[in-house]
């Protein structure tokens, strides 16, 4: 039982630390690639001067996409609640309306958000012409309206105005709110509902090539408005290395704490088992003391037993922990990562845990009086 307690404690410790390193590798790769290729631009001039026009020019998408390293770019803003609270499917009961977010977006936004179309397509420059009423629905918004396909050319009513549905977005890598929204071409939105209120921020989302985000962030204000480049607030991605190390450090600390708690729980179990062994061997201890053994000899015996069993359990636990990391990584199609120093040190950790857990039972054994023990 002592060896089993050490085996479980060390095995869980090795598995948790190994899986932490493996998961860190996967999270860092995915998180860094997405964040490091995103630049956000916001019109801040209207916040300082409410009567000023929007700083973004009409051809903001085209100007931004001409910057080297830009893959896609698109404007977007949210329309007022009076618009979002008056949506229904065409042909349905006109008195039954649904409240859904309505987003005005330029044609490049869906590409910048790395959207995946479930059916249909996104809108283009032609559909962004005032008078041509088309919308793209997020999959959750389409589900709320009961629209699952475009076979019957569905339409939605927004404030009593019909809009033809041309596509349904199935997934996005950025701006997850698009999945619950009704997306209207931004020039059409301006023609129908007017310019956005000064309190509503107008933003641009830019998708860049890896490594180009910082340069793009420096050039985009001048490319958009060389006369007033300070009209924009540009948010650049954090340093990928610092961000990765921060995430890795946080996860490492959390899982090391959990692994340490596993070792403590295992040590408590070992202490309990060793203490029961001392109580069951009182006669043996008393006989050894009567034959001349000193308290230190008895304590050393129990410590040695606990240390040997801890080492044995540590070796088996290390093996099981490594196997658990490899099997879990294979099931998730991950690359297993293990610190070789941890694998080599784990059996010694088992020895230390076994001996530390055996200190109190060894002390109890050393305190047994031979006369009292032989009388029991």
Image: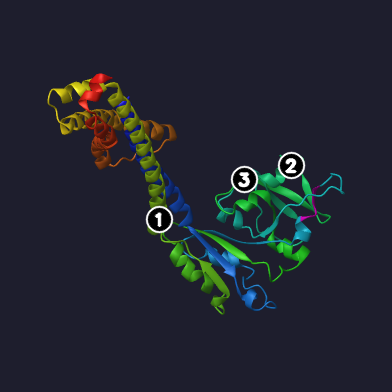
Q: Residue 363 location in percent, x, y?
A: 25, 34
Q: Compute the Cα span from label 3 to label 1.
A: 34 Å
User: Between tags 1 and 2, which lies in front?
Assistant: 1
The residue depicted at 31 percent of the width and 31 percent of the height is 6
Q: Residue 360 location in percent, x, y?
A: 28, 35
What colour scheme has been applied to the protein in the rendered image? Answer: rainbow
Disc nearer the start of the sequence (2/3): 3
The residue depicted at 67 percent of the width and 49 percent of the height is 180
The residue depicted at 60 percent of the width and 73 percent of the height is 44
Q: Which residue is mark 3?
A: 117
Which quadrant of the view contains residue 267? top left
Which quadrant of the view contains residue 77? bottom right
User: Between tags 2 and 3, which lies in front?
Assistant: 2
Residues rendered magenta in the picture:
85-89
Quick check: 9 above or below 239? above
Q: Residue 210 location in percent, x, y?
A: 43, 56
Mark 1 crowd level (few <14, some 14–19, many ≥20, 10 Å Cα): few
Q: Compute the Cα span from label 2 to label 3.
A: 14 Å
Label pair 2/3, CB-CB below 8 angstroms? no
Is 354 within the magenta? no
Secondary structure type for disc 1: helix
Disc nearer the start of the sequence (3/1): 3
Secondary structure type for disc 2: loop
Quick check: 212 above or below 370? below
Q: Which residue is mark 1?
A: 246
Q: Main secondary structure of the magenta part?
A: strand
Of 223 and 347, the residue lying toward us:
347
Q: Which residue is mark 2?
A: 147
Quick check: 366 above or below 80? above
Mark 3 crowd level (few <14, some 14–19, many ≥20, 10 Å Cα): some
Secondary structure type for disc 3: strand
Is 86 within the magenta? yes
């Amino acid at each position: 039982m002592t060896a089993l307690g050490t085996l479980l404690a060390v095995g869980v410790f090795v598995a948790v630390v190994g899986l932490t390193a493996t998961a860190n590798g996967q999270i860092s790769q995915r998180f860094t690639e997405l964040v490091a290729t995103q630049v956000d631009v916001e019109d801040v001039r209207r916040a300082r001067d409410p009567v000023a026009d929007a700083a973004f020019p009409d051809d903001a998408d085209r100007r931004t996409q001409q910057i080297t390293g830009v893959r896609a770019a698109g404007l977007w803003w949210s329309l007022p609640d009076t618009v979002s609270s008056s949506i229904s499917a065409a042909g349905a009961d006109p008195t039954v309306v649904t409240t859904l977010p309505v987003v005005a977006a330029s044609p490049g936004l869906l590409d910048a958000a790395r959207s995946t179309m479930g059916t249909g397509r996104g809108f283009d420059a032609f559909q962004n012409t005032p008078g041509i009423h088309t919308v793209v629905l997020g999959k959750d918004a389409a589900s709320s309206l009961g629209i699952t396909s475009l076979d019957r050319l569905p339409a939605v009513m927004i404030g009593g105005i019909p809009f033809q549905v041309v596509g349904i977005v199935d997934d996005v890598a950025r701006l997850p709110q698009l999945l619950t929204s009704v997306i209207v071409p931004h020039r059409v939105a301006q023609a129908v509902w007017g310019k956005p209120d000064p309190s509503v921020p107008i933003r641009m989302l830019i998708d860049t090539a890896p490594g180009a985000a910082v340069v793009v962030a420096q050039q985009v204000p001048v490319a958009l408005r060389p006369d007033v480049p300070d009209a924009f607030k540009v948010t650049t991605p954090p340093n990928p290395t610092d961000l990765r190390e921060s995430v890795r450090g946080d996860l490492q600390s959390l899982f090391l704490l959990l692994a340490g708690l596993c070792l403590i729980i295992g040590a408590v179990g070992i202490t309990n088992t060793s203490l029961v062994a001392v109580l069951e061997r009182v006669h043996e201890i008393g006989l050894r003391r009567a034959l001349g053994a000193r308290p230190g000899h008895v304590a050393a015996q129990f410590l040695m037993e606990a240390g040997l069993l801890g080492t044995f359990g540590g070796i088996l636990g290390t093996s099981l922990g490594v196997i658990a990391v490899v099997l879990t990584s294979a099931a998730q199609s991950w690359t297993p990562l293990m610190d070789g120093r941890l694998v080599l040190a784990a059996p010694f950790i088992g020895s230390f845990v076994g001996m530390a857990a055996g200190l109190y039972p060894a002390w109890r054994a050393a305190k047994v009086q031979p006369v009292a023990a032989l009388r029991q």
